[in-house]
Image (cartoon, coloured by chain):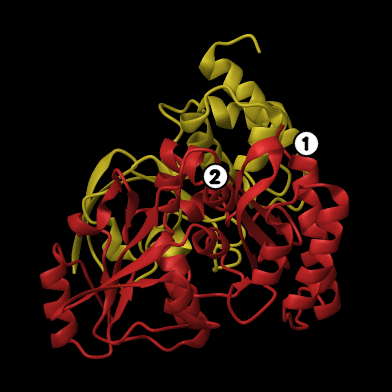
Amino acid sequence: MTLNFILNGKNLSVETSPDRRVVDLLREDLGLSGTKECCGSGECGACTILVDGESRLSCLMLAAQLEGRTLLTIEGLASNGELHVVQQAFVEHGAVQCGFCTPGMVLATLDLLRRIPDPTREEVRRELSGNLCRCTGYQKIVDAVMAAARTLHGGMS
Amino acid sequence: MDVLFPRTLEELQKLRAETPGGLVMEGGTDLLVKIRKTGQKPTAIFCIERIAELQRLDVLDDEIVIGAAVTLQQLLECDTIKTELTALFEALSVLASPPVRHSATLVGNVCTASPAGDTLPPLYVFAAEVEISNTSGRRRQSIAEFITGPGKTTLQPDEIVTAVRVPRPVDGTHSVYYKVGKRKAMAIAVASMAARFEFGEAGAIKTIKMAWGSVGPTVVGAIGVEAYLAGGSLSVDCLREAGRLASAAVCPIDDVRASADYRRQVTGNLLLRLARDKRD
Protein backbone atom coordinates (compact mmCIF):
# COMPACT_ATOMS: atom_id res chain seq x y z
CA MET A 1 0.00 0.00 0.00
CA THR A 2 1.00 3.63 -0.42
CA LEU A 3 1.21 5.40 2.90
CA ASN A 4 1.15 9.17 3.33
CA PHE A 5 2.23 10.85 6.53
CA ILE A 6 4.43 13.63 7.84
CA LEU A 7 7.75 12.47 9.21
CA ASN A 8 9.95 14.97 11.04
CA GLY A 9 8.31 17.88 9.27
CA LYS A 10 8.39 16.44 5.75
CA ASN A 11 5.51 15.00 3.73
CA LEU A 12 6.30 11.42 2.93
CA SER A 13 4.77 8.87 0.62
CA VAL A 14 6.09 5.31 1.00
CA GLU A 15 5.24 1.91 -0.39
CA THR A 16 4.97 -0.60 2.40
CA SER A 17 3.10 -3.58 3.65
CA PRO A 18 0.20 -2.43 5.89
CA ASP A 19 1.14 -4.88 8.66
CA ARG A 20 4.78 -3.77 8.87
CA ARG A 21 5.61 -2.64 12.38
CA VAL A 22 6.33 1.07 12.55
CA VAL A 23 9.72 0.42 14.19
CA ASP A 24 10.74 -1.73 11.20
CA LEU A 25 9.45 0.82 8.71
CA LEU A 26 11.52 3.53 10.38
CA ARG A 27 14.71 1.59 10.99
CA GLU A 28 14.93 -0.77 8.06
CA ASP A 29 12.99 0.89 5.22
CA LEU A 30 13.64 4.55 5.97
CA GLY A 31 17.10 4.14 7.53
CA LEU A 32 16.17 6.05 10.68
CA SER A 33 17.94 3.90 13.21
CA GLY A 34 17.71 6.44 16.02
CA THR A 35 14.52 4.72 17.15
CA LYS A 36 15.64 1.62 19.06
CA GLU A 37 13.98 -1.71 19.55
CA CYS A 38 14.59 -3.64 22.72
CA CYS A 39 11.77 -5.76 24.15
CA GLY A 40 9.37 -5.61 21.20
CA SER A 41 6.43 -5.97 23.54
CA GLY A 42 5.77 -2.56 25.08
CA GLU A 43 7.70 -3.10 28.31
CA CYS A 44 10.77 -0.92 27.83
CA GLY A 45 9.94 2.28 25.92
CA ALA A 46 13.12 2.22 23.78
CA CYS A 47 11.05 2.55 20.59
CA THR A 48 9.00 5.54 21.78
CA ILE A 49 8.10 8.03 19.02
CA LEU A 50 5.62 10.91 18.95
CA VAL A 51 2.49 10.46 16.84
CA ASP A 52 0.41 13.64 16.58
CA GLY A 53 2.43 14.83 19.57
CA GLU A 54 1.66 11.85 21.82
CA SER A 55 4.20 9.25 22.90
CA ARG A 56 3.50 5.90 21.27
CA LEU A 57 5.43 2.67 21.03
CA SER A 58 6.56 2.03 17.47
CA CYS A 59 6.89 -1.71 18.14
CA LEU A 60 3.16 -1.84 18.91
CA MET A 61 1.91 0.08 15.89
CA LEU A 62 1.30 -1.08 12.35
CA ALA A 63 2.43 1.00 9.38
CA ALA A 64 -1.13 1.45 8.13
CA GLN A 65 -2.02 3.25 11.34
CA LEU A 66 0.28 6.12 10.31
CA GLU A 67 -1.85 7.25 7.36
CA GLY A 68 -2.42 11.01 7.66
CA ARG A 69 -0.57 11.25 10.99
CA THR A 70 2.37 13.43 12.01
CA LEU A 71 5.43 11.61 13.33
CA LEU A 72 8.42 12.84 15.23
CA THR A 73 11.44 10.61 15.74
CA ILE A 74 14.69 11.52 17.46
CA GLU A 75 16.20 12.42 14.07
CA GLY A 76 13.71 15.27 13.69
CA LEU A 77 14.39 16.99 16.98
CA ALA A 78 17.54 19.04 16.42
CA SER A 79 17.09 21.95 14.03
CA ASN A 80 19.78 23.69 11.99
CA GLY A 81 22.43 21.67 13.76
CA GLU A 82 21.28 22.83 17.19
CA LEU A 83 20.19 20.33 19.76
CA HIS A 84 16.70 20.62 21.21
CA VAL A 85 16.55 21.98 24.77
CA VAL A 86 15.76 18.49 26.09
CA GLN A 87 18.68 16.92 24.21
CA GLN A 88 21.01 19.66 25.43
CA ALA A 89 19.88 19.11 29.02
CA PHE A 90 20.53 15.36 28.71
CA VAL A 91 24.08 16.13 27.50
CA GLU A 92 24.78 18.71 30.21
CA HIS A 93 23.49 16.57 33.06
CA GLY A 94 25.18 13.32 32.06
CA ALA A 95 21.81 11.67 31.45
CA VAL A 96 23.27 9.57 28.63
CA GLN A 97 25.53 6.62 29.27
CA CYS A 98 25.23 3.79 26.76
CA GLY A 99 22.60 5.84 24.95
CA PHE A 100 20.27 3.03 23.93
CA CYS A 101 17.28 4.29 25.92
CA THR A 102 18.02 7.94 25.17
CA PRO A 103 15.94 8.50 21.99
CA GLY A 104 12.87 7.02 23.66
CA MET A 105 13.60 8.81 26.92
CA VAL A 106 13.96 12.19 25.17
CA LEU A 107 10.72 11.77 23.21
CA ALA A 108 8.86 10.57 26.32
CA THR A 109 10.19 13.71 28.02
CA LEU A 110 8.72 15.91 25.28
CA ASP A 111 5.35 14.22 25.79
CA LEU A 112 5.62 14.64 29.55
CA LEU A 113 6.50 18.35 29.32
CA ARG A 114 3.63 18.93 26.90
CA ARG A 115 1.17 17.56 29.47
CA ILE A 116 2.94 18.78 32.62
CA PRO A 117 5.08 21.84 31.78
CA ASP A 118 6.35 22.33 35.33
CA PRO A 119 6.63 18.85 36.85
CA THR A 120 7.90 17.74 40.25
CA ARG A 121 10.68 15.16 40.40
CA GLU A 122 8.10 12.60 41.47
CA GLU A 123 5.94 13.40 38.45
CA VAL A 124 8.95 13.02 36.15
CA ARG A 125 9.67 9.59 37.62
CA ARG A 126 6.05 8.55 37.25
CA GLU A 127 5.66 9.84 33.69
CA LEU A 128 8.92 8.27 32.49
CA SER A 129 8.14 4.98 34.23
CA GLY A 130 7.54 3.23 30.91
CA ASN A 131 11.10 3.92 29.75
CA LEU A 132 13.80 1.69 31.16
CA CYS A 133 17.42 2.77 31.58
CA ARG A 134 19.92 0.22 32.85
CA CYS A 135 22.88 2.61 33.15
CA THR A 136 22.11 5.86 34.85
CA GLY A 137 20.02 4.92 37.82
CA TYR A 138 17.62 7.62 36.54
CA GLN A 139 18.92 10.34 38.86
CA LYS A 140 20.69 12.25 36.09
CA ILE A 141 17.78 11.75 33.70
CA VAL A 142 15.44 13.35 36.22
CA ASP A 143 17.98 16.16 36.71
CA ALA A 144 18.04 16.74 32.95
CA VAL A 145 14.25 16.77 32.62
CA MET A 146 13.88 19.22 35.51
CA ALA A 147 16.49 21.49 33.89
CA ALA A 148 14.78 21.27 30.49
CA ALA A 149 11.43 22.09 32.10
CA ARG A 150 12.95 25.18 33.72
CA THR A 151 14.41 26.33 30.41
CA LEU A 152 11.25 25.70 28.40
CA HIS A 153 8.82 26.89 31.05
CA GLY A 154 10.93 29.83 32.06
CA GLY A 155 9.84 29.26 35.66
CA MET A 156 11.97 29.58 38.77
CA SER A 157 10.85 26.38 40.51
CA MET B 1 -2.22 -9.73 6.79
CA ASP B 2 -4.31 -6.81 5.63
CA VAL B 3 -4.99 -3.90 7.99
CA LEU B 4 -8.32 -2.24 7.42
CA PHE B 5 -9.82 0.97 8.78
CA PRO B 6 -13.61 0.97 8.59
CA ARG B 7 -15.21 4.37 9.25
CA THR B 8 -18.56 3.10 10.55
CA LEU B 9 -19.83 0.13 12.52
CA GLU B 10 -21.77 -1.04 9.46
CA GLU B 11 -18.63 -0.98 7.37
CA LEU B 12 -16.80 -2.94 10.06
CA GLN B 13 -19.52 -5.61 10.13
CA LYS B 14 -19.43 -5.85 6.33
CA LEU B 15 -15.64 -6.23 6.25
CA ARG B 16 -15.78 -8.91 8.94
CA ALA B 17 -18.37 -10.86 6.98
CA GLU B 18 -16.21 -10.64 3.85
CA THR B 19 -12.97 -11.57 5.60
CA PRO B 20 -13.33 -14.64 7.82
CA GLY B 21 -10.47 -15.11 10.25
CA GLY B 22 -9.92 -11.40 10.76
CA LEU B 23 -9.56 -9.86 14.21
CA VAL B 24 -10.76 -6.56 15.64
CA MET B 25 -7.98 -4.40 17.10
CA GLU B 26 -8.61 -1.70 19.69
CA GLY B 27 -5.30 -0.21 20.85
CA GLY B 28 -3.30 -3.27 19.80
CA THR B 29 -1.13 -3.33 22.92
CA ASP B 30 -2.20 -6.88 23.76
CA LEU B 31 -3.13 -8.17 20.31
CA LEU B 32 0.09 -7.21 18.51
CA VAL B 33 2.22 -8.71 21.29
CA LYS B 34 0.23 -11.94 21.05
CA ILE B 35 0.50 -12.15 17.26
CA ARG B 36 4.25 -11.62 17.41
CA LYS B 37 4.70 -14.13 20.20
CA THR B 38 2.66 -16.91 18.61
CA GLY B 39 3.56 -16.11 15.01
CA GLN B 40 -0.06 -16.76 14.10
CA LYS B 41 -1.28 -13.91 11.95
CA PRO B 42 -5.00 -13.44 11.40
CA THR B 43 -6.19 -12.98 7.80
CA ALA B 44 -6.83 -9.32 8.51
CA ILE B 45 -6.85 -6.78 11.29
CA PHE B 46 -9.79 -4.41 11.59
CA CYS B 47 -8.59 -1.24 13.34
CA ILE B 48 -11.49 0.52 14.99
CA GLU B 49 -9.57 3.70 15.84
CA ARG B 50 -11.16 5.74 13.03
CA ILE B 51 -14.80 4.79 13.69
CA ALA B 52 -16.37 8.03 14.97
CA GLU B 53 -19.19 6.26 16.83
CA LEU B 54 -16.66 4.32 18.91
CA GLN B 55 -14.75 7.46 19.89
CA ARG B 56 -17.57 8.73 22.10
CA LEU B 57 -16.82 9.61 25.70
CA ASP B 58 -20.13 10.92 27.00
CA VAL B 59 -20.98 11.99 30.51
CA LEU B 60 -24.76 11.58 30.61
CA ASP B 61 -27.09 12.34 33.53
CA ASP B 62 -27.14 8.76 34.75
CA GLU B 63 -24.10 7.09 33.20
CA ILE B 64 -20.73 7.56 31.56
CA VAL B 65 -20.41 5.99 28.12
CA ILE B 66 -16.89 5.02 27.08
CA GLY B 67 -16.59 4.05 23.41
CA ALA B 68 -14.32 1.22 22.27
CA ALA B 69 -11.83 3.55 20.59
CA VAL B 70 -11.35 5.83 23.60
CA THR B 71 -7.82 5.54 24.94
CA LEU B 72 -6.87 5.14 28.58
CA GLN B 73 -5.12 8.52 28.45
CA GLN B 74 -8.37 10.22 27.38
CA LEU B 75 -10.09 8.65 30.39
CA LEU B 76 -7.34 9.87 32.72
CA GLU B 77 -8.00 13.40 31.45
CA CYS B 78 -11.78 13.18 32.05
CA ASP B 79 -12.66 15.14 35.23
CA THR B 80 -15.86 13.21 35.93
CA ILE B 81 -13.96 9.94 35.98
CA LYS B 82 -11.41 11.38 38.39
CA THR B 83 -13.99 12.75 40.79
CA GLU B 84 -16.83 10.22 40.53
CA LEU B 85 -15.12 6.99 39.48
CA THR B 86 -11.99 7.52 41.55
CA ALA B 87 -11.16 3.81 41.79
CA LEU B 88 -11.16 3.59 37.99
CA PHE B 89 -9.02 6.72 37.73
CA GLU B 90 -6.53 5.23 40.20
CA ALA B 91 -6.42 1.95 38.28
CA LEU B 92 -5.77 3.81 35.00
CA SER B 93 -2.95 5.77 36.67
CA VAL B 94 -1.04 2.56 37.45
CA LEU B 95 -1.93 0.64 34.30
CA ALA B 96 1.11 0.05 32.07
CA SER B 97 2.87 3.33 31.15
CA PRO B 98 2.08 6.64 29.41
CA PRO B 99 2.98 5.51 25.87
CA VAL B 100 0.91 2.35 26.28
CA ARG B 101 -1.99 4.39 27.65
CA HIS B 102 -1.89 6.55 24.50
CA SER B 103 -2.80 3.44 22.48
CA ALA B 104 -4.63 1.09 24.83
CA THR B 105 -8.38 1.25 25.45
CA LEU B 106 -10.74 0.38 28.28
CA VAL B 107 -12.78 -1.92 26.05
CA GLY B 108 -9.56 -3.67 25.06
CA ASN B 109 -8.68 -4.23 28.72
CA VAL B 110 -12.16 -5.66 29.32
CA CYS B 111 -12.07 -7.97 26.27
CA THR B 112 -8.58 -9.25 27.13
CA ALA B 113 -10.29 -10.40 30.35
CA SER B 114 -7.03 -10.99 32.19
CA PRO B 115 -7.51 -11.99 35.83
CA ALA B 116 -5.03 -9.17 36.51
CA GLY B 117 -6.71 -6.54 34.30
CA ASP B 118 -6.36 -3.31 36.29
CA THR B 119 -9.61 -1.70 35.21
CA LEU B 120 -11.76 -4.74 35.98
CA PRO B 121 -12.15 -4.56 39.80
CA PRO B 122 -13.22 -0.88 39.57
CA LEU B 123 -15.69 -1.69 36.78
CA TYR B 124 -17.14 -4.47 38.97
CA VAL B 125 -17.69 -2.25 41.99
CA PHE B 126 -19.30 0.41 39.82
CA ALA B 127 -21.59 -2.23 38.25
CA ALA B 128 -20.47 -1.37 34.72
CA GLU B 129 -22.09 -2.89 31.67
CA VAL B 130 -20.64 -3.71 28.27
CA GLU B 131 -22.58 -2.75 25.16
CA ILE B 132 -22.29 -5.36 22.43
CA SER B 133 -23.33 -5.12 18.81
CA ASN B 134 -23.66 -7.38 15.77
CA THR B 135 -25.50 -7.06 12.47
CA SER B 136 -28.82 -8.02 14.02
CA GLY B 137 -28.78 -5.68 16.99
CA ARG B 138 -27.33 -4.69 20.32
CA ARG B 139 -27.24 -6.22 23.77
CA ARG B 140 -26.00 -5.11 27.16
CA GLN B 141 -24.46 -7.33 29.79
CA SER B 142 -23.00 -6.68 33.22
CA ILE B 143 -19.22 -6.91 33.33
CA ALA B 144 -19.46 -9.73 35.88
CA GLU B 145 -21.50 -11.86 33.47
CA PHE B 146 -19.54 -10.81 30.38
CA ILE B 147 -16.20 -12.14 31.67
CA THR B 148 -16.43 -15.88 32.22
CA GLY B 149 -12.81 -16.93 32.81
CA PRO B 150 -9.17 -16.03 32.12
CA GLY B 151 -9.23 -14.52 28.62
CA LYS B 152 -12.81 -15.70 28.17
CA THR B 153 -15.94 -13.63 27.57
CA THR B 154 -19.42 -14.19 26.19
CA LEU B 155 -18.49 -12.25 23.02
CA GLN B 156 -19.56 -14.16 19.92
CA PRO B 157 -17.46 -14.23 16.72
CA ASP B 158 -19.78 -11.82 14.90
CA GLU B 159 -20.01 -9.40 17.81
CA ILE B 160 -18.02 -6.36 18.88
CA VAL B 161 -18.01 -4.51 22.18
CA THR B 162 -18.94 -0.95 21.25
CA ALA B 163 -18.77 0.68 24.68
CA VAL B 164 -18.53 0.30 28.43
CA ARG B 165 -21.32 2.04 30.33
CA VAL B 166 -20.73 2.98 33.94
CA PRO B 167 -23.63 4.22 36.10
CA ARG B 168 -22.78 7.51 37.82
CA PRO B 169 -22.49 6.88 41.57
CA VAL B 170 -24.68 8.82 44.00
CA ASP B 171 -23.19 11.89 45.70
CA GLY B 172 -20.99 11.03 48.63
CA THR B 173 -19.62 7.85 47.11
CA HIS B 174 -15.95 7.18 47.82
CA SER B 175 -13.86 4.64 45.96
CA VAL B 176 -10.29 3.38 45.89
CA TYR B 177 -8.07 1.01 43.91
CA TYR B 178 -5.03 -0.66 45.46
CA LYS B 179 -2.50 -2.66 43.49
CA VAL B 180 0.47 -4.68 44.59
CA GLY B 181 2.94 -5.47 41.81
CA LYS B 182 6.64 -6.07 41.34
CA ARG B 183 7.29 -2.51 40.29
CA LYS B 184 5.27 0.67 39.90
CA ALA B 185 5.00 0.79 36.11
CA MET B 186 4.24 -1.97 33.61
CA ALA B 187 3.47 -4.34 36.48
CA ILE B 188 1.00 -7.14 36.23
CA ALA B 189 -0.76 -7.10 39.59
CA VAL B 190 0.09 -9.75 42.18
CA ALA B 191 -3.14 -8.75 43.88
CA SER B 192 -5.43 -5.76 43.58
CA MET B 193 -8.59 -4.48 45.20
CA ALA B 194 -11.29 -1.96 44.38
CA ALA B 195 -13.78 -0.73 46.95
CA ARG B 196 -16.73 1.65 46.76
CA PHE B 197 -18.41 3.11 49.86
CA GLU B 198 -21.12 5.39 51.05
CA PHE B 199 -20.99 6.52 54.65
CA GLY B 200 -24.04 7.24 56.81
CA GLU B 201 -24.53 8.73 60.26
CA ALA B 202 -21.41 9.03 62.40
CA GLY B 203 -19.22 7.57 59.69
CA ALA B 204 -20.84 4.14 59.65
CA ILE B 205 -20.56 2.27 56.35
CA LYS B 206 -23.93 2.57 54.61
CA THR B 207 -23.20 0.70 51.38
CA ILE B 208 -20.09 -1.15 50.32
CA LYS B 209 -18.96 -3.02 47.23
CA MET B 210 -15.59 -4.70 46.89
CA ALA B 211 -13.73 -6.69 44.23
CA TRP B 212 -10.29 -8.28 44.03
CA GLY B 213 -8.07 -8.88 40.99
CA SER B 214 -5.30 -11.44 40.33
CA VAL B 215 -6.59 -13.77 43.05
CA GLY B 216 -8.95 -15.93 41.00
CA PRO B 217 -9.79 -16.87 37.40
CA THR B 218 -11.74 -13.62 37.07
CA VAL B 219 -12.45 -10.73 39.41
CA VAL B 220 -13.51 -12.05 42.82
CA GLY B 221 -16.29 -10.47 44.85
CA ALA B 222 -16.93 -11.42 48.46
CA ILE B 223 -20.44 -10.80 49.71
CA GLY B 224 -19.43 -12.09 53.14
CA VAL B 225 -16.79 -9.40 53.51
CA GLU B 226 -19.22 -6.70 52.42
CA ALA B 227 -21.89 -7.97 54.82
CA TYR B 228 -19.39 -8.02 57.67
CA LEU B 229 -18.31 -4.41 57.06
CA ALA B 230 -21.76 -2.94 56.29
CA GLY B 231 -23.00 -0.86 59.21
CA GLY B 232 -19.56 -0.96 60.78
CA SER B 233 -16.58 1.32 60.49
CA LEU B 234 -13.18 1.31 58.85
CA SER B 235 -11.41 0.63 62.13
CA VAL B 236 -8.25 -1.45 62.09
CA ASP B 237 -9.94 -4.19 64.14
CA CYS B 238 -12.92 -4.45 61.77
CA LEU B 239 -10.66 -4.41 58.73
CA ARG B 240 -8.36 -7.06 60.16
CA GLU B 241 -11.29 -9.42 60.60
CA ALA B 242 -12.71 -8.49 57.17
CA GLY B 243 -9.25 -9.19 55.75
CA ARG B 244 -9.33 -12.69 57.22
CA LEU B 245 -12.70 -13.29 55.54
CA ALA B 246 -11.37 -11.93 52.25
CA SER B 247 -8.26 -14.14 52.39
CA ALA B 248 -10.51 -17.14 52.79
CA ALA B 249 -12.88 -16.07 50.01
CA VAL B 250 -10.34 -15.68 47.20
CA CYS B 251 -8.92 -18.54 45.11
CA PRO B 252 -5.46 -17.54 43.90
CA ILE B 253 -2.88 -19.69 42.11
CA ASP B 254 0.91 -19.99 42.27
CA ASP B 255 2.60 -18.44 39.25
CA VAL B 256 5.82 -16.66 38.27
CA ARG B 257 4.78 -13.49 40.03
CA ALA B 258 3.73 -14.81 43.43
CA SER B 259 2.59 -17.84 45.39
CA ALA B 260 -1.05 -18.47 46.19
CA ASP B 261 -0.31 -18.13 49.92
CA TYR B 262 1.30 -14.74 49.44
CA ARG B 263 -1.65 -13.58 47.34
CA ARG B 264 -4.07 -14.65 50.09
CA GLN B 265 -2.09 -12.70 52.65
CA VAL B 266 -1.89 -9.60 50.45
CA THR B 267 -5.64 -9.80 49.78
CA GLY B 268 -6.34 -9.50 53.49
CA ASN B 269 -3.68 -6.87 54.09
CA LEU B 270 -4.97 -4.63 51.30
CA LEU B 271 -8.06 -3.96 53.42
CA LEU B 272 -5.89 -2.36 56.09
CA ARG B 273 -5.00 0.38 53.64
CA LEU B 274 -8.60 1.55 53.98
CA ALA B 275 -7.90 2.50 57.60
CA ARG B 276 -4.83 4.44 56.47
CA ASP B 277 -6.76 6.31 53.76
CA LYS B 278 -9.95 6.80 55.75
CA ARG B 279 -11.52 10.19 55.22
CA ASP B 280 -12.98 12.04 58.18
Q: Is residue A1 left or right of residue B151?
A: left
Quick one: which chain is red?
A: B
Amino acid type shown at disc 1: Gln
Chain at tag 1 = A
Residue of label 2: B86
Residue A102: where, in percent of width, then height? Answer: 61, 45
Instruction: Assess whether mark 2 and mark 1 are in contact (beta carbons under 8 angstroms).
Output: no
Residue of label 1: A139
Q: Residue at x 47, y 66 (%)?
A: B109
Q: Residue at x 88, y 53 (%)?
A: B237
Residue A100: where, in percent of width, then height? Answer: 64, 52
Q: Name the mark on residue B50.
A: none
Q: Residue at x 65, y 41 (%)?
A: A126
Q: Residue at x 58, y 53 (%)?
A: B91
Q: Is residue A104 left or right of residue A27?
A: right
* Closest to the observer, B98 or A138: B98
Amino acid type shown at disc 2: Thr
* Closest to the observer, A115 or B217: B217
Asked whether the viewer can see residue A7, the reply is yes
Q: Secondary structure at mark 1?
A: helix
Q: Is residue B123 above or below residue A131?
A: below
